[in-house]
Amino acid sequence: MKTAKILIFSLLTLVYSNNAWTSPLCQENALGNAPCNNTLLKSGEVIPSTLSSVDTYLWIEGEIKTHQEIYRQKKDLYADMFRFLDGREMNNKKLGPQIKKEWEATEEDFQTLYQISINIRAVQARLQYCYTSNGGCGPVRRMELEDQLALVQRSKALLLAKRPILSHSGIEEYIKKRVQDFKNDDIPVPADEIKNLVKNASRETAQTLLDKVYSYDRYLNDRNAPLTHKNNGAYAKKYLENLTSNHPQIVDDLLDRFEMIPPPADKQGMLCSLSQKREKERKRDAMVKAGVETSLFIAPFLLGPWGRAGVFGLEGALGAKLLRWGLTAKEIEQAAWLSRAAVGLSTNALQTAEVMKLGETCKNLEQKYFFSADTSKFQALSDCKTEYQDSMFIASMGWAMAMAPEIPGPVLKFYKAKFTPQLTSITTSSSQIGANLKSTPLAKNQWAKEFTTKDQGTFTYMDLSKIERVSDQHMKSLPDDYWKFVGDIYSERLNLTPDEIKGFIKSSQDFAPRTKLIVNTPGSVKDAQNFKGGVGVVISGKSDDLLPLEKAIGKKLERKPGEKSAEIVRLTVSKDADAEKLSKSLINQAAGLVLQDPEIKTVYIYTSKIHRRLYGKLGVTPTNISAVSDRDVLITLKREDIEKLLSNTMN
């Protein structure tokens, strides 16, 4: 137990170090000032002199009513999940498709959690041997195994944060018991058993959320609450200063909300003060408690957006068990790796450009949801949050292939099937590809889709934001090979200098995380040695995400803040191809890619005057075209124009 207490102290020091982890509510602004410092608060105070205590109380009350309605909606969702799995009629029949989708996703994540648990068991067994009294293995080997266990524990924690219902104690005990039998590694958990476990967890989670709704009632009907008359300001101020001790969960929910979404500027100082008070109280409470229960009291913001409590966060008591889920007290007491796993839970290292953009999209959806908490916004935010968590989880699994020698065979097979991005092949006519791209986005485990045609060879659509997870070196180098192919043709036709070509290739590589690329090859792309042509689409989620043309002309376009745009780029056809027919097919497919995303409102094409004639033949009117230089023009198209372009280019 002495070892465990030392571990507890070291983890608490790690988690609560103000230098290492500062709540987003208290971080310094661009001028180097922290919100709490700006309000000039005395120790223990919450309300700055610039705020009315009564108005602040009313503002918090309004936020709490919104939270209560959100928890009520979540309770109804889990209650109907239970009825669905129990074969009963749901209260809200409209939720049928959503519940079915949620159940299927939960079943899939259950199997993933099971496989991760098998991997943990295998690494733990090796590590336990290292911990034996006769030495077992050297310190270097022990450190390697501890690092591996920290990594796999982090992946498990992210999966539990994504699907909180899987943290239910019944599911934990079931998986812990099942993974002790090494004979079942090749056998997935039967669907009926998962169904019963999730059904029970849904019922208990619905009850937990109902209790949460009642706790909000108690706060909203607190007999000691201040009367909302302006003369009661002094009492309201005192009431708010005691809020963290009298209503800690209410404060925690409020802080979780505004650690994800920027608070009103005049409330940030007050929220920062509440955050600092709660951190001190949490640290005090954790230090008072004894035993391993406090060994992972993780500050919520360590997990990044949508990986913690709040709107879609950690139902039940998941926060304290993210890493120790499935472990015995003895295993935790021996686990020096836990502190490294806790540090690893910081999501900053996993934030690729694509994930950050998705996070911003989810934040915007959450703001809309809090403003009007209806079921359609709930579902939109839930879908976005799931995609965000999947992206984070898959990023965390990047270590799996590198650690293949340490992974049991069945687990490695499972990981490769689930997390290695796939290329799928379809045989179709070239005239149908654009419509297919419009209606059928890539699945989460796909990075490319190959369309084989009888008359125009093979068209391959690639999402370059997933290129780093591709293990096939030929496919991984394909985009760079295409940029060089385009550079050679541009050099010849447009008389570009070598430096211009280098800049063009470098620019194409820089925009890859936001690029969807289509290439045309004579045969299968897997064996392709040359290109017949291709085209790209670069997505801009907001006006600050520059488009290639803005970089090329050195000037930002006038775009609406927050509006999604796209640019069709690198349209190229080789000498030996039917230029007009192939160009038409590539433009058709680029239009389909654009229309795949309903949020894209405007599309730009920065091209030469030679290509201007081509677009004119396809229905682009002169009013959509403006001259940029003697050589180049800018075509600006709205969504309805792209719909026409898709229709006009069906060969």
Image (cartoon, rainbow, N blue to C red):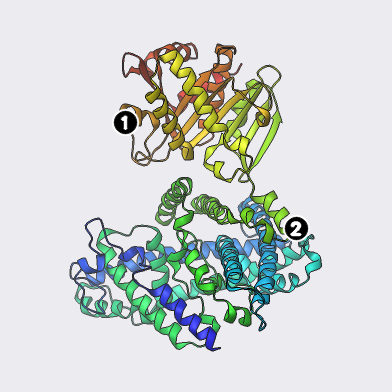
Instruction: Classify the position of the C terminus by image quarter.
Output: top right
Crowding at dot 1, Cα within 10 Å, few <14 / some 14-19 / many 20+, comes out as few
* CA gap, disc 2 and disc 1: 52 Å
Residue shown at 63%/71% (left/top)? 168
Instruction: Classify the position of the N terminus by image quarter.
Output: bottom right
Residue 429 vertical position relative to residue 555 in the rendered view, above or below: above
**Residue 37 spot, x, y in % from top left:** 22, 68
What amino acid type should be assigned to the residue bearing mark 1?
Leu
N-term mark: 2 or 1: 2
Looking at the rendered structure, the secondary structure element under dot 2 is helix
Q: Which mark is residue 410?
A: 2
Work out whether residue 51 can be spotted. no
Look at mark 1 in the image and give the residue it sits on.
Answer: 557
**Residue 287 spot, x, y in % from top left:** 44, 85
**Residue 548 spot, x, y in % from top left:** 39, 31
Crowding at dot 2, Cα within 10 Å, few <14 / some 14-19 / many 20+, comes out as some
Residue shown at 76%/65% (left/top)? 193
Does 241 sit left or right of 82 as displayed? left
Does 223 sit left or right of 577 as displayed? left
What amino acid type should be assigned to the residue bearing mark 2?
Pro
- The image quarter in which residue 551 lies: top left
